[in-house]
Image: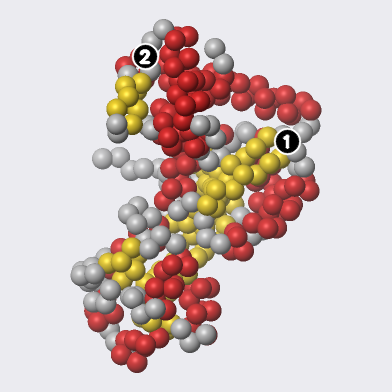
């Protein structure tokens, strides 16, 4: 039995789809399928039920998944112990990124990480903020930047900075809307990001208890697209203050003064990996690049 076969088993089980797991593992689909088949033959059980919609664990697969995860975790702990004995931080860390690199101070962070830990490799993955938490939880990301509400206690959250969003209008609508009440602004088309995203949550909170949602909602998946659509007179949106201010100074949008929204930028990682030397190295660099950053303990959930 080979460890990479167990890792493939875990990836397919978590993602529920052979193609997505193959992309995550940087394998071809036939190679991954071959590994799963070899593991099933080695164990003498069928691990997955295959269908056109994906891969579902069998009863045997569900029972063996936890054991497979323990084996991989034990191997990782052995590697980490060996790294500490050598005094080296060696390995690849998959880091999710949201927003643009300058806002995350990625350039400074990478330069310092390579200086402090020359054998550490950082693999960057641009993700939506909603996907950041999913990726950290399912192991496709080791850590990720994220903005929005503080995650639950299964993830460690390091607070980096507050982010303010402003209600931003097309400049052609400014004469009509800048002094208009919320109800008038709210009736215009609004540009929002897809379901479960942090930006969409901010928009929903803005409307909550103020008015009903507008009849027309337009989805856009990135901040550059959102600001471009506002500038093109497609609709109103919440835009990060830094971007809104630049566009407003250029005379392309107007910032409505009646409301704003504030959220927080975090770095998050799995709470079970607190002692991981790769994450320890990343956090050491992070605290230098972001002075004042601190781990924030999640509030305990209240009972029913």
Frontmost residue, 153 versus 197: 197
- Structure colour scheme: secondary structure
Report which residue position mark 2 lands on. 46
- Could you give the CA–CA distance between mark 2 and mark 1, rounded to whole angstroms? 38 Å
Label 2 SS? loop
Frontmost residue, 58 versus 161: 58
Say how many tags the image has: 2
Instruction: Look at the picture and state if 176 lies above or below 104.
Output: below
Report which residue position mark 1 lands on. 89
Frontmost residue, 71 versus 149: 71
Q: Residues within 10 Å of mark 2 (few under 14, many from 20)?
A: some
The percent coordinates of residue 262 (x first, y second) are: 44, 66
* Screen quadrant of the N terminus: top right
Quarter of the image holding residue 186? bottom left
The percent coordinates of residue 289 (x first, y second) are: 68, 57
**Residue 111 appears anywhere in the view:** yes
Residue occupying image coordinates x 40% and y 27%? 13
Sequence-first tag of 2 and 1: 2
């Amino acid at each position: 039995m080979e460890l990479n076969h167990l890792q493939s088993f875990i990836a397919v089980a978590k993602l529920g789809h052979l193609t997505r797991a193959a992309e995550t593992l940087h394998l071809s689909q036939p190679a991954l399928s071959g590994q799963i088949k070899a593991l099933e033959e080695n164990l003498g059980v069928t691990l997955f039920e295959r269908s056109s919609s994906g891969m579902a664990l069998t009863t045997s697969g569900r029972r063996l998944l936890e054991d497979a995860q323990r084996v991989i975790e034990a191997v990782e702990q052995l590697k980490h112990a060996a790294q500490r004995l050598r005094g080296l931080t060696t390995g690849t860390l998959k880091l999710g990124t949201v927003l643009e690199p300058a806002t995350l101070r990625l350039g400074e962070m990478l330069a310092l990480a390579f200086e402090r830990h020359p054998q550490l490799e950082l693999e960057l993955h641009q993700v939506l903020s909603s996907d950041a938490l999913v990726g950290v939880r399912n192991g496709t990301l080791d850590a990720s930047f994220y903005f929005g509400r503080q995650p639950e206690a299964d993830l460690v959250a390091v607070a980096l900075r507050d982010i303010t969003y402003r209600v931003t209008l097309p400049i052609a609508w400014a004469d009509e809307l800048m002094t208009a009440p919320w109800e008038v602004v709210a009736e215009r088309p609004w540009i929002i990001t897809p379901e479960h995203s942090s930006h969409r949550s901010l928009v929903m909170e803005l409307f909550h208890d103020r008015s009903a949602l507008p009849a027309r909602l337009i989805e856009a998946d990135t901040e550059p697209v959102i600001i471009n659509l506002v500038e093109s007179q497609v609709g109103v949106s919440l835009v990060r203050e830094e971007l809104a201010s630049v566009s407003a100074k250029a005379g392309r949008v107007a910032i409505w003064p009646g409301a704003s929204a504030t959220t927080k930028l975090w770095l998050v990682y799995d709470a079970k990996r607190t002692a991981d030397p790769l994450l320890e190295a990343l956090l050491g660099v992070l605290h230098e690049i972001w002075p004042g950053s601190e781990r924030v303990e999640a509030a305990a959930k209240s009972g029913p």
